[in-house]
C-alpha cells in the first residue's frame, strides 16, 4: 500500500481528462477509468510514500503554507519506459518549489519516499493509461492531441491511498 500526496484539478480539467479516459477505453486502451479499484481521480502526484504514518504525514504537511490555486499548462503526451502514458505539464519554478516542499515535509514525518519522486528526478504528470502497450500508442495519441493544449488549475490537495482509492482531503492547498 502506498500513499500519494496529490494536487487535484479544477472541475473543467477533471471533466476533460475523465472524457479522455473514456475515449481511450472506447478505443480499446485500458485507462485510469477502469484501472485497479476504479476510484481514480485526475491528479498530479507530488510525492509517493511507500511507508508512512497517515497522522504524521498529515501533521507534517499542515506546517506548509496554504498556497493559491496553481495554473497548469498541458501540451504534451509522455510515456515512461514501463509503458505508462501521461499528460505532461510545463514544469514551472512554482510547481518544482511546491513539489520540493511537499517532499521535505512528507519525509520529515518519517515516511519512505519512492525514488521517482525525489526533487530533480521527479517527472510531473497526470496518468492516462497505466499499462499501455507501445503498439497502442497511435490509438492514444489521436484523442490526446484532440484535447491538448489543456489549461488547468490545481485547486485542492489530498492524500490518496493507492490501493483503495480512498481520499483524505487536505484543508489547504499545497
Image (tube, rainbow, N blue to C red):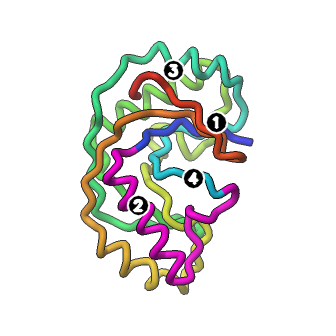
Among numbered discs 3 and 2, the one appearing first in the sequence: 2
Task: Give the alpha-carbon distance from disc 3 to disc 4, as whole Å.
Answer: 22 Å
Which residue is disc 4 drawn over? 40
Is 169 one of the magenta-colored residues? no
Residue 154 point in image, percent of width and height: 34, 40
Which residue is disc 3 drawn over? 61
Q: Residue at x 25, y 54 (%)?
A: 151
- Element carrying mark 1: strand
Which residue is disc 2 drawn over? 17
Q: Determine crowd level at label 3: few under 14, some 14-19, many 20+ residues with C-alpha closer than 10 A.
A: many
- Tell me the mark number nearer the camera, choosing from 3 and 2: 2
Marks 3/4 in contact by CB < 8 Å: the verdict is no
Marks 4/1 in contact by CB < 8 Å: the verdict is no
Which residue is disc 1 drawn over? 49
- Tell me the mark number nearer the camera, choosing from 3 and 4: 4
- Element carrying mark 2: helix
Q: In the rendered image of this protein, does residue 75 appear above or below residue 23? A: above
Residue bounds of the magenta highlight? 9-37
Q: Residue at x 70, y 28 (%)?
A: 52
Q: In the rendered image of this protein, does residue 60 appear above or below residue 34? A: above
Among numbered discs 2 and 4, the one appearing first in the sequence: 2
Amino acid at each position: 500500500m502506498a500513499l500519494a500526496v496529490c494536487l487535484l484539478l479544477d472541475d473543467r480539467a477533471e471533466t476533460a481528462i475523465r472524457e479522455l479516459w473514456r475515449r481511450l477505453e472506447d478505443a480499446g486502451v485500458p485507462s485510469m477509468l477502469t484501472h485497479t479499484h476504479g476510484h481514480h481521480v485526475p491528479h498530479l502526484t507530488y510525492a509517493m510514500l511507500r511507508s508512512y504514518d497517515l497522522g504524521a504525514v498529515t501533521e507534517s504537511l499542515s506546517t506548509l503554507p496554504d498556497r493559491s490555486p496553481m495554473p497548469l499548462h498541458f501540451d504534451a503526451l509522455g510515456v515512461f519506459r514501463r509503458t505508462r502514458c501521461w499528460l505532461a505539464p510545463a514544469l514551472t519554478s512554482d510547481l518544482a518549489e511546491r513539489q520540493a516542499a511537499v517532499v521535505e515535509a512528507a519525509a520529515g514525518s518519517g515516511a519512505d519516499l519512492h525514488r521517482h519522486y525525489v526533487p530533480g528526478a521527479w517527472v510531473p504528470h497526470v496518468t492516462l493509461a497505466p499499462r499501455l502497450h507501445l503498439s497502442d500508442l497511435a490509438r492514444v495519441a489521436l484523442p490526446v492531441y484532440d484535447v491538448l493544449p489543456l489549461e488547468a488549475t490545481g485547486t485542492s490537495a489530498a492524500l490518496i491511498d493507492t490501493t483503495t482509492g480512498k481520499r483524505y482531503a487536505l484543508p489547504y492547498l499545497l
